[in-house]
Amino acid sequence: MIAQQSAWRMFRLPILISLMALFVAFLYKDDISASLVTLMLGALEIALSFDNAVVNASILGHMDAKWQRIFLTWGIAISVFGMRLLCPLFIIWVAAGLGPVDALHLALNPPTAGAAYFPDGSPSYETLLHGAKPTIHGFGFAFLAMFTLSFFIGARDRMWLAWIERPLGWLGRLDELPVMRKLHYLRVIPTLATLGMVAVMARFFVEPADSHPAVFAGVTGIVVFLAVKGLGEMFGPEGHSESASLLVGRAAFFSFLYLMVLDSSFSLDGIIGAFAITADPILIVLGLGFIGSMFVLPCTVYLVRRGTLKSFVYLEHGAFWAIGALAAVMMVTSGTIEIPDAATGAIGVVFIGASIVSSIVHNRRHSETAPVVV
């Protein structure tokens, strides 16, 4: 009963805000279909971001209650307004050379339904954003690839898909070499592997005219990951093990910054995918931000407080495999190839579901073989 009350306290505000978002969408368009579109966008964001919540929980669990509250307040504000509203406008600003005001005007005044260009031949907001997809996907793919490889490359106490996780773990032994220890913050093996995949993306998946921007974005994603992750480790407890003290002060700040960049990388694919449903930025903000993000971020804190990652021992592995799959999808779709968002979400659901089932089987086996204490 206490757990149910705790869950209700955690999610009652997202439920209330979601209902308000649906009502605002109806008032905005004076049409119930706008509310349905907003609801679809929210469901899309939740489906694509549950693995994000699981991984965020593994990081947030090392932060004290103060920074968990900050994650629920400032984190939601940055996620909703920063990524779902300002980020697309910034991309248009850079890609089309438009000022922020002009980009917002273009977003709020789309051409006729289904048209990619205005009658005067100028491109629409949606067309400009899709034109920047190689750059957007290049950054997101590289950041998420670094994130995934940094998890699997190295010694781990427990493995899930051992047939592939074990060879990746062996690569981590190279870090024990004296020269590699000096270059620890550069994460040489994941960096070299990701750079190789960025080259593959530019050679086989991106149009020749877009290869240079895509490579630049990919390298930027690697640098941002190394910088944010390195600062977090520099000021935090070594290794962030379960026995380590909770992160406070600068260590917690850099971990919070790391979480925000991670959330941003996840949301890039959802922002692009949202335009398959609607090009209206207001509905996108209401659906992805005020419904999707408002559920995903509290879900992260809920997973931490319920100790879900300790109960489901392979859940974190499943989430990282889902993130790796998302990175692969972003690499493949950086050019003209399209993969439905439903398929991307389904891949994540399969990995998460399989890891939960494996965790349940693991727990039952260990409970049956554990010695009885009398």
Image (cartoon, rainbow, N blue to C red):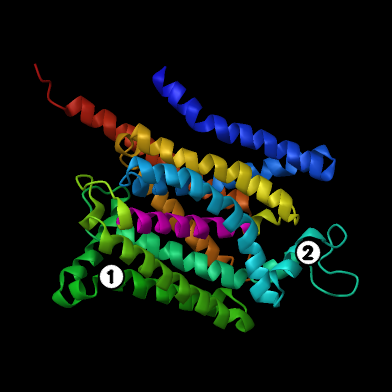
Q: How many marks?
A: 2
Q: Nearer the viewer, residue 64 or 170?
A: 64
The disc placed on residue 105 is 2
- Mark nearer the N terminus (2 vs 1): 2
Q: Secondary structure at mark 1?
A: helix
Q: Quadrant of the N terminus?
A: top left
Side of 45 where 164 appears, left or right:
left
Q: Which residue is mark 1?
A: 185
Name the amino acid type tagged 2. Answer: His
Residue at the (71%, 43%) spot, across then down: 38
- For the question of whether residue 235 can be seen, the reply is yes
Circles 2 and 1 in contact, beta carbons < 8 Å: no
In the image, is residue 220 above or below residue 21? below
Please check the rendered image and state whether residue 254 is part of the magenta-colored stretch, yes or no.
yes
Magenta extent: 251-271
Hey, what amino acid is under mark 1? Tyr
